[in-house]
Image (cartoon, rainbow, N blue to C red):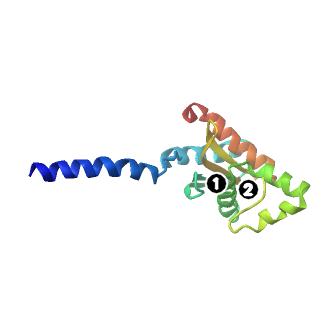
Amino acid sequence: MKKVLLSLALATAVAAPAFADNTVKQTSLGTAFAVDLAQAAVSACAADGYNVAAAVTDRSGILLALVRAENAGAHTANAATAKAYTSASSRNPTSGMVETVQKNPAAAGLADIPGFLVLAGGVPVKVGKDTIGAIGVGGAPGGNLDEACATKALDKFADRLK
């Protein structure tokens, strides 16, 4: 019996480092915080008189939360989700991608990536240099205004992003 237990212990000790070499740990946004961010973005836009939707994704661009003002247009939920996905997967604000496409015709193909929406209003959620998610807002009368609402939500919870 001792030999069996010793064999198991040795096999575990040898396998653990190999397993660690084959896996990656990544930090991602949690659902409860995603809901708070989405609500804060919708509230920030409402304070400015805009009916919007806000979507928050995890670091991979998978939807965690979606909040839509009652009077927001039907298209706003999809636009917000696509902006958040685009920002999360590119790890950049979508407004920067818009500028890149305008200045560099070779980058115009970004708009052809399935699921991407190259319009301002998507902002990555970062802790230090690490992107842990993204927030997208759609429905204000300009992407710059959508982005401002997303930024206000991030600013409101800056203490939770440390």
Which residue, given by chain and number where applicable, does mark 2 sit on?
A: 139
Give the image location of residue 86, x and y in percent.
69, 57
Which residue, given by chain and number where applicable, does mark 1 sit on?
A: 69
Q: Is residue 35 left or right of residue 7?
A: right
Give the image location of residue 80, x and y in percent.
67, 57
**Residue 1 visible to the viewer:** yes
**Within-10-Å neighbours for mark 1: few <14, some 14–19, many 20+:** some
The residue nearer to you, when weighing 71 against 115, is 115
Label 1: which secondary element:
loop
The residue positioned 65% from the left and 56% from the top of the image is 89
Give the image location of residue 84, x and y in percent.
66, 54
Image quarter of the C terminus: top right
The image quadrant of residue 60 is bottom right
Give the Cα distance between marks 2 and 1: 10 Å
Furthest residue toward left: 1
The residue nearer to you, when weighing 33 against 104, is 104
User: Which amino acid does the dot numbered 1 rest on?
Assistant: Ala
